[in-house]
Image (spheres, rainbow, N blue to C red):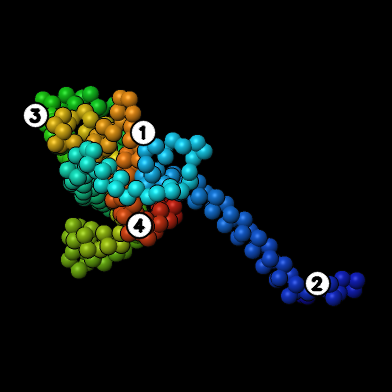
Amino acid sequence: MQTEVRPELRGTLNPADIRVKRRARFNWIDVFRFIILAIGAIAMLFPLFWMVTIALKSNNDVFKIPPEWFPREFHWSNFVTGTKEINFWQTFGNSLFIAITCTIGQIISSVLVGYGLARLKFPGRKLWFSLFIGSLMLPGFVGMIPMFNLYTSIGWYDSWLPIIVPAFFGNATFSFLFVQYLRTISVSFDEAAKIDGASDLYVLLKVLVPMSMPVIMTMVIFAFQGAWNQYLEPLLYIIDPSKWTLSLAMATYTGTYATAWNLFMAADLIYILPMLLLFFFGQKFFMQGLGSMNSAGLK
């Protein structure tokens, strides 16, 4: 049944005008959203811009008032001199080895644990999953003293083993993320592979892992960032300067009386470069992983 329009309103309700008004309203919303995002992007990129500016200045120009937003003379040699002030490249290699090893260990162990909790049926599965969730609420400082005594008693002090070995025993956060992501994948894929004679390990490696690359790449980024930036564990367990990580070496830039901030910022830019490159090449999977985890109930 068609609704009649009152005679006095006829000719005033033009569908084309209504669509134009709606389009204009939506455009204003998009402009407002763009402005908000641009302000947030500028606020987040400004520290990086200021780091680059300081890294290209002389140390005297760093403290000029009012500050110079752009250096008058570009001191590119700061990047070379900044790496010579400390044993930069050796500690860079140490950190890179530790970060890659810890990332591999955390991903392999967390994927195996997550698959077992999500797909395998065994007694006490819910209890183990609850224990994993409960362990996320415990701060890392709780087990610091017992673990230090343990590693010292077995002769791991002044080595990388206390940093690397625990990474191969799973990560509760990553295991939880992988469990939540597997819940978004239908079990029919597992059943179809097992009908053809596939084992659980084959299903995990050949079926589920390729389908779970977004969340795995998200875990890789977080694991590498955590291992690359860790400072407390190397500070506790490593004494020999030749075994230092880059985070420990960068801390030596802070002198008792003065700090060459231009050299520090130049070295710091090289320090953050691996993380920037990793996120740049993995951002596609990273965004897909976040979107999938949101759809699984992780917000």
Q: Are marks 4 and 3 in contact (CB under 8 Å)?
A: no
| Residue nearest the observer in this picture, 191 or 202 | 202
Q: Earlier in the sequence, mark 2 or mark 3?
A: 2
> How far apart are the alpha carbons under marks 1 and 4?
31 Å
Q: Earlier in the sequence, mark 1 or mark 3?
A: 1
The residue under label 2 is: 13
> How far apart are the alpha carbons under marks 2 and 4?
50 Å
The residue under label 4 is: 280
> How far apart are the alpha carbons under marks 1 and 2?
59 Å
Amino acid residing under circle 3: Gly
Query: Which residue is rendered at x = 68% and y = 62% of the image?
Result: 25
Quadrant in the picture for residue 13: bottom right
Identify the element where label 2 is drawn.
loop
The residue under label 3 is: 155
Q: Earlier in the sequence, mark 2 or mark 4?
A: 2
- Residue 179's x, y, as percent? 32, 50
In this rendering, the answer to whether 85 lies above or below 39 is above
Q: Is residue 155 left or right of residue 226?
A: left
In this rendering, the answer to whether 255 lies above or below 32 is above
Disc 4: CA contacts within 10 A as few (<14), some (14-19) or many (>=20): few
Q: Earlier in the sequence, mark 4 or mark 3?
A: 3
Disc 2: CA contacts within 10 A as few (<14), some (14-19) or many (>=20): few
